[in-house]
Image (spheres, helix red, strand yellow):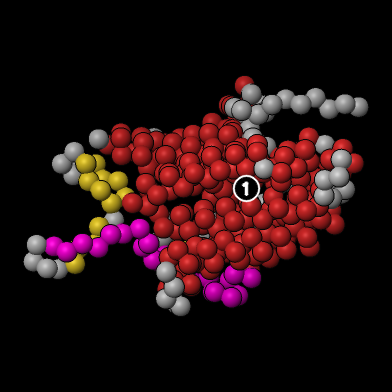
């Protein structure tokens, strides 16, 4: 049962990484840039939901929707102000700008909400009435005579990840905007000549990625309830690793890479060493890239010169 418990934990953690990685891979696949401020958008979404629920007494559903709206607007603003002027700039300039935006968001959060850790409220619980009439709060289900416990947040996280993956795939394959995104991914110049608004398409990509970041922030803080201005930094880096692991630019690759990364990290902590788990994760990435430089599901595209 211990192995099965670690397996479920790894899938849950990997689902969070996968949702975050989807934002990375969509932006890179279409705009060909790495938005390293994506992890801090996660943090902003978690803070918005936290204050909406704990301070203003709104329901968790409203808190999550509000976080998605705020992060969507934030993603569009970041793209318009920081990245759009650098559309033709060298990749190094974009990378430095992304790091600057990340620091700006972290320090802005620290000024607004302080650096003191905040305990995220438990959303995914069910209250029942006990035998003596008292309220009993359940946060999961027990199987095999209480030998295996699965939390509701774990179940919800996996379901949300699968739904998002399916919806994004259908959106990019069948919708007009999704086809425009795929066209821009192939060749932005040719897409522009065909009448596609490239700037609007890239802005929509940032909006979708930022909305996913808000969802990931709420799920992550529900599972690991300590919230600080640097909450999204390490998960953001690991999610970027997951995107590269699965093949950056590929939506199924981000999903697969996130799940595998979560499993590797969980089993490394359980059976090898908690201190070495991060090193093992990045070692696995190096091994995969040595064998498949484009990632597990990435495709090699030769550049014409």
Question: Can residue 255 be seen in the rendering of this structure?
Answer: yes
Residue 127, how many percent across, how many down? 25, 63
**Residue found at the far bottom of this picture:** 56
Question: Can residue 25 be seen in the rendering of this structure?
Answer: no
In this view of the protein, which residue sits in the foreground, 150 or 295? Answer: 150
The residue at which mark 1 appears reads as 23
**Residue found at the far top of this picture:** 291
- Residue in the picture at 83% in, 27% down: 303
Q: How dense is the environment of label 1, judged by Cα within 10 Å: few (below 14), some, or many (20 and up)?
A: many
- Classify residue 74 as left or right of residue 256: right
Residue 56, how many percent across, how many down? 46, 78
Residue 253, how many percent across, how many down? 59, 33
Q: Quadrant of residue 210?
A: bottom right
Magenta segment: does it hold 207?
A: no
- Residue in the picture at 86% in, 45% down: 195
In this view of the protein, which residue sits in the foreground, 153 or 241? Answer: 153
In this view of the protein, which residue sits in the foreground, 106 or 175? Answer: 175
Note whether 118 is above or below 149 in the view shown. below
- Residue in the picture at 28% in, 51% down: 140
Considering the numbered disc 1 on the image, is that residue within a helix, a strand or a loop? Answer: helix
In this view of the protein, which residue sits in the foreground, 267 or 35? Answer: 35
Identify the magenta region. Answer: 108-130
- Residue in the picture at 25% in, 48% down: 141
**Residue found at the far left of this picture:** 132
Magenta segment: does it hold 126?
A: yes
- Classify residue 76 as left or right of residue 278: right
**Image quadrant for the C terminus?**
top right
**Image quadrant for the N terminus?**
top left
């Amino acid at each position: 049962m211990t192995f099965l418990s670690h397996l479920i934990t790894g899938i849950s953690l990997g689902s969070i990484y996968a949702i975050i990685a989807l934002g990375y891979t969509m932006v890179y696949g279409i705009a060909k840039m790495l938005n390293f401020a994506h992890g801090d958008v996660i943090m902003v979404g978690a803070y918005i939901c936290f204050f909406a629920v704990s301070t203003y007494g709104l329901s968790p559903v409203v808190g999550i929707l509000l976080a998605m709206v705020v992060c969507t607007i934030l993603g569009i603003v970041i793209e318009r102000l920081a990245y759009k002027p650098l559309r033709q700039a060298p990749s190094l300039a974009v990378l430095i700008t992304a790091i600057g935006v990340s620091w700006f968001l972290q320090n802005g959060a620290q000024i607004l909400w302080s650096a003191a850790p905040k305990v995220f409220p438990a959303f995914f619980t069910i209250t029942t009435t006990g035998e003596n009439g008292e309220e009993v709060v359940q946060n999961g289900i027990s199987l095999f005579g209480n030998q295996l416990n699965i939390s509701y947040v774990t179940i919800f996280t996996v379901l949300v990840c699968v739904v998002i993956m399916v919806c994004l795939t259908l959106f990019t394959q069948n919708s007009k905007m999704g086809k425009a995104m795929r066209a821009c991914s192939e060749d932005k110049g040719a897409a522009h000549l065909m009448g596609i608004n490239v700037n609007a398409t890239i802005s929509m990509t940032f909006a979708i990625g930022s909305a996913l970041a808000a969802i990931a922030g709420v799920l992550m803080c529900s599972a690991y309830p300590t919230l600080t201005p640097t909450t999204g930094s390490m998960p953001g880096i690991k999610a970027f690793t997951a995107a590269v692991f699965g093949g950056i630019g590929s939506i199924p690759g981000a999903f697969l890479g996130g799940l595998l990364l979560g499993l590797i990290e969980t089993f490394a902590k359980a059976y090898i060493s908690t201190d070495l788990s991060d090193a093992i994760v990045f070692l696995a990435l190096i091994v995969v890239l040595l064998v498949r430089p484009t990632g597990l599901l990435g495709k090699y595209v030769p550049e014409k010169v």
